[in-house]
Structures are given as C-alpha cells and as structure tokens.
Image (cartoon, helix red, strand yellow):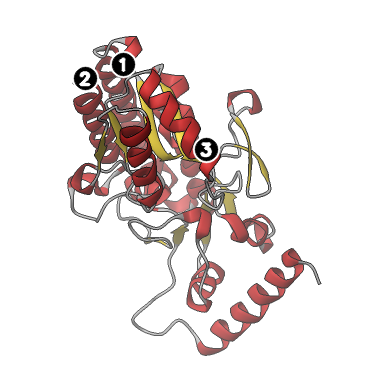
C-alpha cells in the first residue's frame, strides 16, 4: 500500500471514530472551518458574525508539516464549509480536502489564473502556494471565499457581499502602502534572505530579490551546499540582515550566519524574536499581528528597517 492510500485509510478510520464519539459540547461544529489563520481572518471579516468561523491550524503552525489529529479530522467532517489554500500548501491533507464529498471543501486559490502562479515543485504540487504575499493577488482569493460563503449560506449573502466590499477596499489601501514603503528602499538594497522560500510572490509584486535557505516547502531540508551558496550571496551583495520566520526554526539561518562571519568576514545580523517575519500563519488573536493586514504591515516595516541600514 503506497503512502497516499495509507493516509487516505487513516483519514477514513479517524473520521469514522470521531463522528461516532461526537464533537462534544465544548467544541460545537463550525459553520466555516479554515485550514490556516490567514484564510480564517478573511472568512471572519466576510462573515461579520453571521456564521461561526473556526481555524484548524493555530498561530505559529507550519502547514507544510501539519499532521491532523483525529479531532481535527472530525472538525473537518462536521463543518458545513471547509476553506483551504490548495496548491498543496496543506501537504498530506491535500488529497482528503480535494476529494471531500458534497463540494464542502473549497480551495481559495481555485480562481487564480495559472499564468499568475509561480512554478514550484512542492509537496506534490506544481506551483508556489504562498499567494497571500502579493496583496493584490490575495484579493482574488478573498473573492473566492466570499462566493463560497454566499453559496453555502444564501440567507446571509447580501451581508457577506457588503463586508467583502469593505474588506477588499482595505486590501487595496494595504497593497498601496506596501508598494510605497518598498519603493522607499533603494533597489540594490531589496535583497531579502529568509528561512524558506515563501516570499516569491512578495518579490515579484514589490520588486525584491528573495533567497530562502529551504525550498518553497519547509519539508525540504537544506544541505551544506545551499548554506555555502547562500553565505556567498550574502557576502557578495553585502546583505545586512537575515530574517527568521515565526513558523520555521532558525537553526539553519544560524548556520548561514556563522558561515558568513567565519568564511567571508561579513558581519551580517539575524533578525528574530519579536521581529521575526510571519510567513505561513498569523500571530496570536487580539494582537496587532493577529490579522492578515497586521502581519503584512509588520513584515514590510521590519524588512525596511533592517535592510535600510
């Protein structure tokens, strides 16, 4: 039995077991269940409290490596609508989500034109799934979320459309803000080195050169060859800072830092802790980075601050 069939069997058994037990009074089924906090934030803005929106993966969770528990699979099975990123961001869950019965699961990237997607061989997919780093591109996904929610809950469709219109206008302003802040940085200084290659859409939209230690998926390990090549790139272009990510361990970048300092005598610094970039998930709910717009502003402000020096 191959890996995919084994995982499908695990999903089937786990869901059956959870449904037999029930969700329990402390965890009522969600009307809308989003796999990631980024999708969940958009769904909550559109819902406006009319339907219950829950998020499967909490703050700091790496969706590439996510392993669903039996309870998670039960939540997926009981939700009226499941919103997932698609493009294989959710790794091993992708097959289960794409083949969910009754059209209950919707990939929010389904309406993106293929020519707008970046190529990448990631977790069995052909495209880079990190589309939200281009705010203008993410607007299309928000439109898909709106349409899916209107179709599933037609009694609230008018409210959803009004909320989405307001939110999309905010995203227009956000995209303009990121573009203006990016343009304040000299083109030669727009060199962003991160834990994994998640910022490709950001690079294309806002004219940065981005280098990631790991590939598009964090499931791909980085070897000494990649560390050496990245260290040489940093020294050659006098890159002043490396940026850690909240959902990816920083031990690999620490190796790059040591290599740059020891072999190339360039004193690059590692940006982390409260200034780590948000890549695959949002911050804690109720904090400034607990929303999509908050993480976008955090990221661009931190990037400009440390690359301008």
Give the Cα distance between marks 3 and 1: 22 Å
Residue drawn at (55%, 54%) of the image: 90
x, y percent for residue 116: 58, 24
Q: Few, some or many C-alpha atoms within 10 Å of disc 2 (few <14, some 14-19, many ≥20)?
A: few
Whichever of labels 1 and 2 marks the residue nearer the N terminus, that label is 1
Which part of the image, by quadrant, shows the C terminus? top left
Residue drawn at (26%, 39%) of the image: 270
In this orientation, does residue 140 appear? no
Mark 3–mark 2 contact, CB under 8 Å?
no
Which part of the image, by quadrant, shows the N terminus? bottom right
Of 57 and 52, which appears nearest the observer?
57
The residue identified by callout 2 is 308
Of 133 and 28, which appears nearest the observer?
133
x, y percent for residue 217: 54, 46
The answer to whether residue 234 is left or right of residue 5 is: left
Give the Cα distance between marks 1 and 2: 7 Å
The residue identified by callout 3 is 226
Q: Residue furthest right?
A: 1
Whichever of labels 3 and 2 marks the residue nearer the N terminus, that label is 3
The answer to whether residue 197 is left or right of residue 26 is: right
Mark 1–mark 2 contact, CB under 8 Å?
yes
In this orientation, does residue 120 appear? yes
Q: Secondary structure at mark 3?
A: helix
Residue drawn at (26%, 21%) of the image: 177
Mark 3–mark 1 contact, CB under 8 Å?
no
Q: Secondary structure at mark 1?
A: helix
The answer to whether residue 89 is left or right of residue 138 is: right
- Snapshot quadrant of residue 192: top left
Q: Which mark is drawn over residue 189?
A: 1
x, y percent for residue 73: 54, 72
């Amino acid at each position: 039995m191959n890996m995919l069939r084994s995982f499908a069997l695990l999903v089937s058994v786990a869901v059956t077991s959870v449904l037999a037990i029930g969700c329990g009074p402390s965890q009522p089924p969600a009307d809308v269940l989003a796999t990631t906090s980024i999708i969940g934030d958009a769904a909550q803005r559109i819902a406006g409290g009319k339907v219950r929106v829950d998020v499967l993966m909490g703050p700091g969770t790496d969706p590439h490596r996510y392993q669903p528990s039996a309870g998670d699979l039960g939540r997926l099975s009981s939700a009226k609508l499941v919103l997932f990123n698609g493009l294989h961001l959710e790794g091993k869950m992708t097959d289960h989500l794409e083949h969910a019965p009754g059209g209950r699961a919707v990939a929010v990237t389904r309406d993106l034109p293929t020519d707008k997607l970046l190529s990448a061989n990631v977790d069995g997919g052909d495209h880079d799934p990190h589309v939200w780093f281009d705010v203008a591109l993410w607007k299309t996904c928000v439109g898909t979320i709106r349409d899916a929610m209107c179709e599933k809950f037609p009694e609230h469709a008018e409210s959803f459309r009004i909320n989405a219109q307001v939110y999309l206008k905010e995203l227009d302003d956000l995209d303009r803000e990121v573009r203006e802040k990016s343009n304040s940085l000299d083109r030669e200084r727009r060199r962003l080195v991160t834990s994994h290659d998640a910022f490709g859409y950001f690079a294309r939209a806002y004219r940065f050169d981005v280098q990631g230690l790991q590939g598009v998926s964090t499931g791909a390990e980085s070897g000494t060859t990649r560390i050496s090549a990245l260290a040489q790139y940093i020294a050659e272009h006098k890159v002043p800072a490396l940026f850690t990510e909240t959902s990816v361990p920083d031990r690999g970048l620490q190796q790059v830092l040591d290599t740059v300092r020891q072999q190339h005598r360039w004193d690059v610094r590692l940006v982390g802790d409260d200034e780590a970039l948000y890549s695959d998930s949002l911050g804690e709910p109720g904090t400034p980075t607990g929303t999509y717009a908050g993480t976008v502003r955090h990221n661009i402000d931190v990037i400009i601050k440390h690359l301008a020096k």
